[in-house]
Amino acid sequence: MGLKGAFQCLNDDATRKTFDDAILRMIQETEYTVITALIDKQWMLRQRHWTKNHPYHYLMEILVEKYARFLIRKNDIGDVMPESRQNPKDALLQKAEEPRSSHQAQGYGDYGPPACQAGWSST
């Protein structure tokens, strides 16, 4: 399979099967909610009014807003931890979200009362 680093052990078929079985069992036994959003990136980029917005940033904004509204409905709190891609796109996304994150941490966010706001952190 050619896996490297921490996942190198999964190159062994028996270890990978044990890992896969454990993950599948956890997914089946855990209660969770999936929040999704889709965009047509090609269509979006052809629209004049979208030329200044990166599609990934827009999609993240939609997902965070949906998650925050979910938390408000449940009267709960939570965190957002987007995947780290270790490339310049991460830096662009983090820079775009810094003002929002700073305001939310201070309780001034636009996603409801401070107790219901979704946090923003990167991994």
Image (spheres, rainbow, N blue to C red):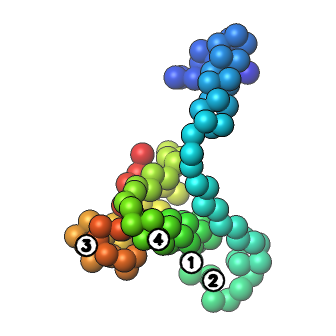
**Which residue is under mark 1?**
53
Quarter that holds the N terminus: top right
Marks 3/4: CA distance? 18 Å
Badge 1: how crowded within 10 Å, few (<14), some, or many (20+)? few
Marks 4/2: CA distance? 30 Å
**Which residue is under mark 2?**
50
- In the image, what residue type sits under mark 4? Arg
Which badge, 2 or 3, is on the more N-terminal residue? Answer: 2
Label 2–label 1 contact, CB within 8 A: yes
Residue at screen point 37% across, 60% down: 77
State the image quarter where residue 30 is shown: top right
Badge 4: how crowded within 10 Å, few (<14), some, or many (20+)? few
Residue at screen point 72% across, 13% down: 13
Marks 4/1: CA distance? 29 Å
Label 4–label 1 contact, CB within 8 A: no
Q: Nearer the viewer, residue 2 or 122?
A: 122
Above or below — where is 47 with respect to 91?
A: below
Marks 2/3: CA distance? 29 Å
> Where residue 65 sits: x, y (%)?
50, 72
Circle nearer the viewer, 1 or 3: 3
> Where residue 9 sits: x, y (%)?
59, 15
